[in-house]
């Protein structure tokens, strides 16, 4: 059992990717409130610094998760400064605004979306490099630090799109489904070394990424029978739970947080 919400992460060191905005920023703030010393990591360095400056003992690092050397350098910097790393939450990810526009145009015109045939190699690689390769880079770096100490918790942020794959969004769905499977495979390996890996799979969440979603597509996600868009803080609370000792028996879990849109 934890010692109470105010002390849950006292004395622990946490690294959060994608911490410059959205879910990552919400996770970083929550961990800081709960006592952790937090490193906010983002490809947008000024954004990371802006978030880290909100609390005492906040640190900011700039890294593109699609670049393995940058990820390794960020983890090495944390260990160099503080000698340990207890919690990693990997929230960095990207979408494809152009593909979203194509889907929205088809929705307005009441016709099926035609995306796959128009999807270029660069768009495919951008999404998979960040969402899938980036998850591998972060998991690998985390295990290199945590496994020797036989302790640690890693949470990856996936997507409900991995299960309810949207027509016209194949690269995003594939990247997130791959990230889920990757996290689960690593979880089975890592637990032998005392490291827990789990995943939260949000549905529509009110982040900057969602704000860039075309209005027609946002309306398409609206459903009066389920909860509306989640807030970043609601998803952050789930990620923080998975990282805490309260989730000690959860290993390789993928927790859907989609407001009741579907179950698996």
Image (spheres, grey):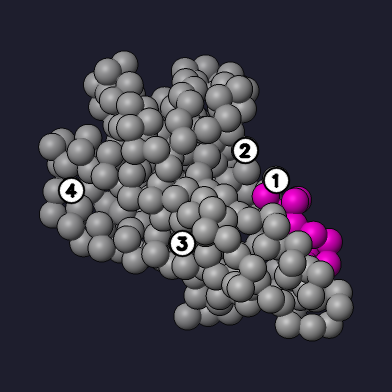
Q: What's the mark number on residue 208?
A: 1
* Location of residue 158 with respect to 12 vertically, above or below: below
Which residue lies at the image location 13% right of the left edge and 37% below the top edge? Answer: 148
Report if the CB atoms under discs 2 and 3 are less than 8 Å apart: no
Residue 229 in sight:
no
Q: Is 26 situated left or right of 35 in this image?
A: right
Kind of element beneath mark 4: loop
Report if the CB atoms under discs 1 and 2 are less than 8 Å apart: yes
Q: CA distance from mark 3 to mark 4?
A: 27 Å
**Residue placed under numbered mark 4 in the picture:** 194
Kind of element beneath mark 2: loop
Q: What's the mark number on residue 175?
A: 3
Q: Quadrant of residue 2?
A: top left
Q: CA distance from mark 2 to mark 3?
A: 21 Å
Report if the CB atoms under discs 3 and 1 are less than 8 Å apart: no
Q: Earlier in the sequence, mark 3 or mark 4?
A: 3
Q: How many marks?
A: 4
Q: Quadrant of residue 257?
A: bottom right
Which residue lies at the image location 40% right of the left edge and 47% below the top edge? Answer: 134
Q: Is 103 situated left or right of 109 in this image?
A: left
Q: Earlier in the sequence, mark 2 or mark 3?
A: 2
């Amino acid at each position: 059992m934890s010692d109470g919400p105010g002390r849950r992460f006292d004395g622990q060191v946490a690294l959060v990717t994608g911490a410059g905005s959205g879910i990552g920023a919400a996770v970083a703030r929550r961990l800081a409130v709960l006592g952790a010393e937090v490193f906010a990591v983002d490809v947008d360095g000024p954004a990371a610094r802006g978030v880290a400056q909100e609390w005492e003992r906040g640190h900011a690092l700039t890294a593109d998760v699609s670049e393995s050397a940058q990820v390794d350098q960020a983890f090495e910097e944390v260990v160099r400064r503080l000698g340990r790393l207890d919690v990693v939450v990997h929230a960095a990810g990207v979408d494809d605004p152009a593909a979203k526009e194509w889907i929205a145009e088809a929705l307005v015109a009441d016709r099926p979306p035609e995306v796959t045939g128009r999807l270029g190699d660069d768009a495919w690689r951008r999404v998979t490099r960040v969402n899938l390769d980036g998850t591998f880079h972060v998991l690998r770096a985390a295990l290199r630090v945590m496994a020797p100490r036989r302790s640690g918790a890693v949470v990856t942020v996936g997507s409900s799109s991995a299960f309810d794959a949207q027509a016209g969004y194949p690269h995003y769905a594939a990247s997130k489904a791959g990230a889920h499977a990757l996290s689960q495979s690593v979880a089975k390996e890592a637990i032998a070394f005392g490291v827990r890996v789990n995943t939260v799979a949000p549905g529509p969440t009110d982040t900057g990424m969602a704000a860039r979603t075309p209005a027609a597509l946002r309306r398409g996600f609206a459903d009066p029978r389920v909860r509306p868009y989640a807030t970043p803080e609601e998803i952050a609370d789930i990620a923080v739970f998975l990282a805490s000792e309260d989730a000690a028996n959860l290993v390789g879990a993928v927790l859907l947080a989609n407001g009741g849109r579907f179950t698996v």
